[in-house]
Image: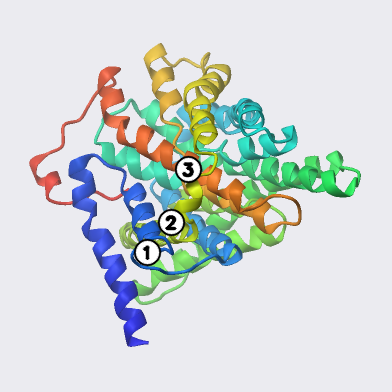
């Protein structure tokens, strides 16, 4: 037990110690966490054999719920007035366009059935909240509020559509082997339930949680823990009812912040710290899950799919869904480039692997490489691209060089 605690604590401690290094180098910290996880795995010096996709999916889902709740706590509900329409359009129409174009490219480049290609497109169609929250903050750029809020809101709102597409196409791929009829109507009901129950559960759950916290008289240090436990109750409860627990967790954070009368500083600080820990554990686990030597299979088609996703699908999705909503050409280009992929696509790629059907671990490996390319190319260049487009850079202060800002 002591050795286990020692090694786990040491890994987390060293990973956090790399944060200032990543900030100075301009490297995405989440990519470093993925690399550390891969080094600990069976192909790295750590030699840890870990292939439990079900456990990784469950752990990742809970960690992502915490990340989204903390992101909601840091989001002012007033952003919906200026960024609600473009963010919603990107989270629905944008996801559909991205999935369709990327799916066609995947089917052609990997030479797989079109259903499998579209499934891969659906898995990588949504932007990632953890990556977006962190890298926008880490880049140190001063974006126009509407542009920044659109990016952040989109990453928190696009999970239901991506989950719906992934679940639907996973069922469609499974019917290829059994010749069973595909029930499109039930899939439509699933989408309505995911979005509707997620929205209602998140908003009203957050308000109820705020009222309870304002009513109860507890030791000051217990409020942050109770808040996080309440958020996970909302996440799990909404999921059990058939809604999107991820959307509910994000909206619960926004609703709680808007309605809570009690000082919220301790709650925000605690959830911010826990958010960092969840991000680290999530990306370490995903890095540990992958086998680096297997990533070289289909590497060139995978690079081609990533290029289509970043250079064709995402820009077309942006211009189709929000190009007419008042953003300048430079802002639309920036929105096109900052379509960061992270933990969400990797988690969605696990779902078809653990579900009945023909999808193998190779599917997961392809998505993992696409995410790694996105984090490397897009995550590393957010600041330079913003400055190149003249979108208001904010030079870091001297004291900021010595410490890392929260996501």
Q: Secondary structure at mark 2?
A: helix
Viewer-side residue, 238 vs 4: 4
Q: Secondary structure at mark 3?
A: helix
Q: Residues within 10 Å of mark 2 (few under 14, many from 20)?
A: many
Instruction: Name the residue at 69% across, 62% down.
Output: 240
Q: Residues within 10 Å of mark 3 (few under 14, many from 20)?
A: many
Residue annotated with mark 2: 287
Q: Are dots 1 and 2 in contact, CB under 8 Å?
A: yes
Residue annotated with mark 1: 40
Question: In the image, residue 364 lies at what x, y percent?
Answer: 57, 49
Instruction: Name the residue at 55% across, 27% down.
Output: 85
Q: Are dots 3 and 1 in contact, CB under 8 Å?
A: no
Instruction: Name the residue at 64% across, 31% down.
Output: 103
The answer to whether 70 is drawn above or below residue 337 in the figure is: below
Viewer-side residue, 249 vs 354: 354
Q: Upstream in the sequence, badge 3 or badge 2? A: 2
Viewer-side residue, 6 vs 358: 358
- Which label is found at residue 393? none
Instruction: Name the residue at 67% across, 44% down.
Output: 166
Q: How many marks?
A: 3
Question: In the image, residue 233 lies at what x, y percent?
Answer: 57, 66
> Disc 3 versus disc 2: distance between alpha carbons?
11 Å
State which quarter of the image contains the N terminus: bottom left
Q: Upstream in the sequence, badge 3 or badge 1? A: 1
Whether residue 273 can be seen here: yes
> Disc 3 versus disc 1: distance between alpha carbons?
18 Å
Residue annotated with mark 3: 369
On the image, which quarter does residue 143 sit in? Answer: top left
On the image, which quarter does residue 2 sit in? Answer: bottom left
Residue 181 as seen in the image, left or right of residue 7: right
Q: Secondary structure at mark 1?
A: helix
Residue 365 as seen in the image, left or right of residue 130: right
């Amino acid at each position: 037990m002591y050795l286990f605690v020692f090694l786990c604590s040491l890994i987390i401690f060293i990973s956090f110690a790399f944060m200032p290094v990543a900030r100075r180098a301009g490297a995405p910290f989440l990519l470093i966490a993925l690399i550390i996880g891969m080094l600990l795995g069976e192909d790295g010096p750590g030699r840890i054999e870990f292939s439990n996709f079900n456990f990784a999916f469950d752990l990742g889902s809970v960690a992502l719920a915490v990340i989204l709740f903390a992101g909601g706590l840091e989001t002012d509900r007033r952003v919906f007035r200026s960024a609600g329409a473009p963010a919603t359009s990107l989270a629905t129409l944008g996801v559909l366009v991205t999935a369709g174009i990327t799916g066609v490219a995947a089917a052609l480049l990997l030479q797989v059935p079109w259903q499998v290609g579209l499934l891969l497109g659906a898995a990588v169609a949504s932007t990632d909240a953890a990556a977006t929250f962190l890298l926008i903050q880490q880049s140190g750029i001063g974006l126009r509020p509407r542009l920044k809020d659109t990016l952040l809101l989109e990453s928190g709102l696009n999970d239901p559509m991506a989950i719906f597409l992934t679940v639907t196409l996973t069922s469609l791929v499974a019917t290829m082997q059994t010749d069973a009829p595909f029930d499109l109507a039930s899939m439509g009901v699933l989408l309505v339930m995911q979005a509707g129950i997620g929205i209602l559960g998140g908003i009203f759950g957050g308000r109820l949680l705020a009222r309870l916290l304002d009513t109860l008289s507890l030791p000051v240090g217990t409020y942050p823990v109770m808040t996080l436990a309440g958020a996970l109750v909302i996440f799990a409860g909404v999921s059990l009812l058939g809604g999107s627990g991820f959307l509910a967790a994000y909206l619960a954070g926004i609703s709680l912040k808007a309605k809570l009368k009690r000082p919220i500083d301790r709650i925000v600080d605690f959830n911010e710290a826990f958010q960092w820990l969840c991000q680290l554990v999530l990306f370490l686990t995903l890095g540990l899950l992958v086998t680096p030597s297997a990533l070289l299979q289909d590497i060139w088609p995978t690079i081609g799919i990533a290029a289509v996703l970043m250079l064709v699908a995402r820009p077309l999705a942006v211009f189709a869904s929000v190009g007419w909503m008042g953003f300048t050409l430079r802002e639309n280009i920036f929105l096109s480039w900052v379509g960061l992929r992270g933990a969400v696509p990797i988690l969605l790629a696990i779902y078809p692997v653990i579900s009945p059907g023909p999808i193998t671990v190779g599917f997961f490996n392809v998505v993992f490489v696409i995410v790694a390319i996105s984090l490397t190319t897009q995550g590393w260049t957010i600041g330079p691209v913003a400055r190149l487009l003249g979108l208001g850079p904010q030079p870091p202060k001297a004291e900021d060089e010595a410490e890392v800002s929260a996501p």
